[in-house]
Amino acid sequence: MPDTPFIDRIVLSQIKDSGFTWRGNLSLSRFTRLQHEIHADQPSDDLWVSVDLVAGVSGLFWLTLRVRGELRLTCQRCLEGLIYPLSIDNRVAVLSSERLVELMDESDDYVLVAEIEAPEQTEAATVDLFQVIEDECLLAVPASPKHDDCAAAKTQAGDIEQLKPDNPFAQLSQLKK
């Protein structure tokens, strides 16, 4: 069965009864913000993505997101490429208005979607599904990726001279005399 096309923006009112499910591959080249984290010689692999968006109670929607793939990041020690296995399994509440934030537990992750045209109607609320996926990928990437056994961490440019710190009270002892 061929992949169905990915739908970037979902109008929440259109899926409140049936939900939305999509599984397939997304080209890494589509992720423009994630491209800034990728090492220069990254092959254009795809990321496997699984999305389930279902309506909950009181206008809440729940997004179950799974992403698998490999990213070639830049090691911050040696500046060479390193393979980072990307594995995301998240459940995120999608809120159509700010009033729904009160229904969330402190431990729940949520996304507040922009409301279009009618601020008080959930019928107008849409979620940019692609942006949520890219946000989750960016959050999963380490801030400072490093090889576990990086050669640059083991090399030293020369001997480190041990300096004895100046005693801040040395001048006071001279005043005593």
Image (spheres, rainbow, N blue to C red):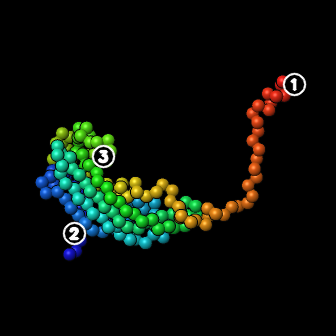
Kindly indicate whether the residue at mark 1 contacts the one at mark 3 (C-beta within 8 angstroms): no
For the point 51% across and 67% down, which residue is it? Answer: 81
Dot label at residue 164: none
Disc 2 or disc 1, which is closer to the eye?
1
Residue designated by label 2: 4
Depth check: 174 or 44 in front? Answer: 174
Percent x, y for residue 91? Answer: 29, 53
Residue designated by label 1: 177
What is the three-letter code of the residue carrying label 3? Asp
Q: Dot 3: few (<14), some (14–19), or many (≥20) neighbours within 10 Å?
A: few
> In terms of secondary structure, where does tag 3 sit?
loop
Percent x, y for residue 172? Answer: 79, 27
Depth check: 39 or 140 in front? Answer: 140
Question: Where 40 sits versus 137, above or below?
Answer: below
Kindly indicate whether the residue at mark 1 contacts the one at mark 2 (C-beta within 8 angstroms): no
Residue designated by label 3: 108
Percent x, y for residue 79? Answer: 56, 64
Depth check: 109 or 124 in front? Answer: 109
Question: Where 75 sits versus 17, above or below?
Answer: below
What is the three-letter code of the residue carrying label 2? Thr
Q: Quadrant of the C terminus?
A: top right
- The residue at the far bottom in this view is 1
Disc 3 or disc 2, which is closer to the eye?
3
Residue 171 falls left or right of residue 6: right
Q: Quadrant of the N terminus?
A: bottom left
For the point 26% across and 42% down, which residue is it? Answer: 104
| Quadrant of res 18 | bottom left
